Image: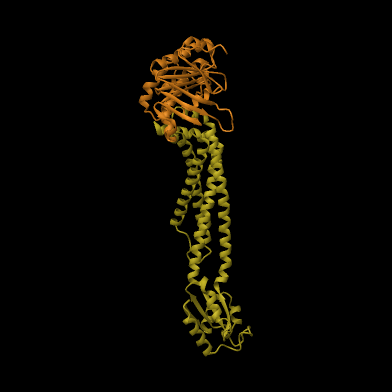
């Protein structure tokens, strides 16, 4: 599903690579934690998958496509198959829950009838049934992140990228968020989650990839967060 | 669904920076109407010039018995000299038509021109009026020098007067006015371009959250940029509509009034006006559309 072949990324005007010789494969349906300190290259890894950045060296394949050979006008089609969730939720404050989720389908030109059928299903899936009309500022952090997850998942992407989704949420609520991610993963969606949250990683017992200074220092099936942090 | 969404976005965009949008519309309107006025001026001047150019003649005044010009004239022009001149003029390829005006005819014209001032007419006798050749040229502006030099100083010729030199002063005035209008219009167009760029940039900045999410969920570039592009073009069209009204005003109030002072018809037709207005629309839409497009390429990259 995601294949990095000896990928190096050096940002302009910087000597140290953000990623160095990263060589790994994430299979379809896998749940992967990406751990490591700030600046270790987790975000660069996610941005490369979205083709928001181009690798300095090496090849990346996502959903069977060679990103280097993907023309610019086809990048949006790649992104329709990838859902994204962020630490800061990125909801539209002037739209309610339903509209926020529907927005993701409207802007890719889905028909209104399809949207009306699919959006409530996904809102139920993330556990926000009955809260369609709430505005983002009327929701708790955990609920806002659920809306963001509903929006990321509403188009049934093959891959879900989560960049510290529990970063702004207390541990008790985080468990609920992880349950939603697990539910999404069980539908066959590949989930890649960058995180600092040791408790979550340890409790989930999923594959863990650890980055340090842009290098993969650990890649463990059913791993834990590690002692160093 | 799609078009609904796009128009909603445009409306939101235009309303959100209302002040900028109004400024943009006004500047586009003024620059387009000045440009249009310049074009109407060009048409008016051309029309007038063509009209006069077909009428303009060289007058070759011949000597009379008591000509003031004693260096060129030694007594009245003789029959032979007049024949000679007539022959010279008629043989020149640049000359289209030669008319001989006798003293009697000149006096009759003079009396007619000053008919409201009989005391003035009574002081001038028929013998004071010089006979003349009225020469019509094929190409007045280019051939004047050749014909004038051929007859200037010839025996019997008092003076050669080109009506073009009298008209050229008037032309200079019109040309100057036209150039001033066009220069101001061009400066304003530059201002309009910068304003469009700024408005679109502000609009893109105001909606960076929306566009960021659109990018993320895989909306196509076209879909993301279309509302902004249309926003610019709609503002341009509104400005153009205003300028069209202003241009109609310029034509009906200014140019049509100017026409009253001329005894012949050199007025611009409605077709001319429509032509200028359509041209202004093309300029306006291209200006706003292209500027928005180029601005968006910088601020809404994939």
Where residue A159 sits, quadrant-wise, is top left
Left or right? Give the position of A106 relative to A217. Answer: left
> B224 and B44: which one is in front?
B224
Task: Tell me the quadrant of the picture where the N terminus of chain A can be found.
Answer: top left
Please report the residue visible at 50 percent of the width from the left and 26 percent of the height from the top.
Answer: A21
Please report the residue visible at 47 percent of the width from the left and 73 percent of the height from the top.
Answer: B138
> A187 and B26: which one is in front?
A187
Figure label count: 0
Vertical placement of A111 versus B50: above or below? above
- Residue B270 % position (x, y): 44, 56
Where residue B171 sits, quadrant-wise, is bottom right
Please report the residue visible at 43 percent of the width from the left and 34 percent of the height from the top.
Answer: B223
Task: Tell me the quadrant of the picture where the C terminus of chain A can be found.
Answer: top right
> A3 and B4: which one is in front?
A3
Can residue A151 be seen at all in this image of the molecule? Answer: no
- Residue B220 % position (x, y): 43, 33
> A168 and B171: which one is in front?
A168
Hue used for the chain lettered B: yellow
- Residue A155 % position (x, y): 40, 24
- Residue B253 % position (x, y): 52, 55
Vertical placement of B87 versus A133: above or below? below
- Which colour scheme appears in the figure? by chain
Which chain shows up in orange? A
Can residue B51 be seen at all in this image of the molecule? Answer: yes
């Amino acid at each position: 599903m995601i294949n990095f072949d000896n990928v190096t990324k050096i940002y302009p005007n910087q000597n140290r690579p953000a990623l160095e010789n990263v060589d790994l494969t994430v299979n379809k349906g896998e749940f992967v934690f990406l751990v490591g300190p700030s600046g270790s290259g987790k975000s660069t890894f996610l941005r490369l998958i979205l083709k928001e950045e181009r690798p300095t060296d090496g090849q990346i394949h996502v959903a069977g496509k060679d990103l280097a050979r993907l023309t610019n006008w086809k990048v949006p089609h790649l992104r329709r198959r990838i859902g994204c969730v962020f630490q800061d939720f990125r909801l539209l404050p002037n739209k309610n829950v339903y509209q926020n989720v529907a927005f993701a389908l409207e802007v890719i030109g889905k028909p209104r009838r399809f949207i009306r059928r699919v959006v409530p299903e996904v809102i139920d899936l993330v556990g926000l049934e009955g809260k369609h009309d709430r505005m983002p500022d009327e929701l708790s952090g955990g609920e806002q992140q659920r809306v963001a997850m509903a929006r990321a998942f509403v188009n049934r992407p093959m891959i879900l990228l989560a960049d510290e989704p529990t970063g702004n949420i207390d541990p008790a609520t985080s468990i609920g968020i992880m349950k939603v991610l697990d539910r999404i993963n069980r539908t066959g969606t590949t989930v890649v989650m960058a995180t600092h949250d040791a408790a979550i990683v340890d409790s989930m017992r999923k594959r863990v990839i650890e980055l340090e200074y842009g290098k993969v220092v650990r890649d463990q099936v059913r791993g834990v967060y590690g002692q160093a942090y | 669904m799609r078009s609904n969404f796009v128009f909603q976005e445009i409306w939101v965009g235009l309303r959100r920076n209302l002040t900028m949008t109004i400024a943009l519309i006004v500047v586009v309107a003024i620059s387009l109407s000045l440009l249009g006025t310049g074009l109407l001026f060009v048409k008016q001047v051309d029309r007038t010039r063509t009209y006069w150019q077909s009428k303009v003649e060289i007058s070759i005044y011949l000597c009379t018995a008591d000509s003031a010009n004693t260096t060129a004239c030694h007594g009245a022009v003789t029959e032979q000299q007049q024949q000679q001149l007539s022959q010279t003029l008629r043989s020149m390829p640049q000359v289209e038509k030669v008319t001989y005006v006798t003293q009697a005819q000149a006096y009759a014209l003079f009396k007619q021109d000053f008919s409201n001032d009989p005391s003035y007419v009574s002081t001038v006798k028929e013998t004071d009026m010089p006979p003349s050749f009225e020469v019509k040229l094929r190409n007045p502006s280019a051939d004047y020098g050749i014909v004038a030099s051929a007859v200037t100083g010839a025996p019997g010729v008092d003076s050669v007067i080109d009506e073009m030199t009298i008209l050229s002063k008037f032309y200079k005035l019109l040309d100057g006015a036209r150039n001033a209008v066009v220069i101001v219009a061009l400066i304003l167009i530059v201002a309009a371009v910068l304003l469009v760029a700024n408005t679109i940039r502000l609009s893109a900045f105001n909606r960076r959250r929306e566009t960021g999410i659109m990018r993320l969920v895989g909306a196509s570039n076209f879909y993301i940029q279309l509302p902004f592009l249309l926003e610019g073009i709609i503002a341009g069209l509104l400005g153009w509509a205003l300028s069209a009204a202003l241009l109609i005003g310029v034509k009906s109030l200014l140019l049509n009034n100017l026409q009253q002072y001329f005894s012949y018809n050199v007025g611009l037709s409605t077709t001319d006006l429509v032509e200028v207005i359509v041209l202004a629309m093309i300029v306006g839409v291209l200006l706003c559309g292209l500027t928005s497009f180029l601005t968006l390429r910088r601020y809404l990259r994939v």
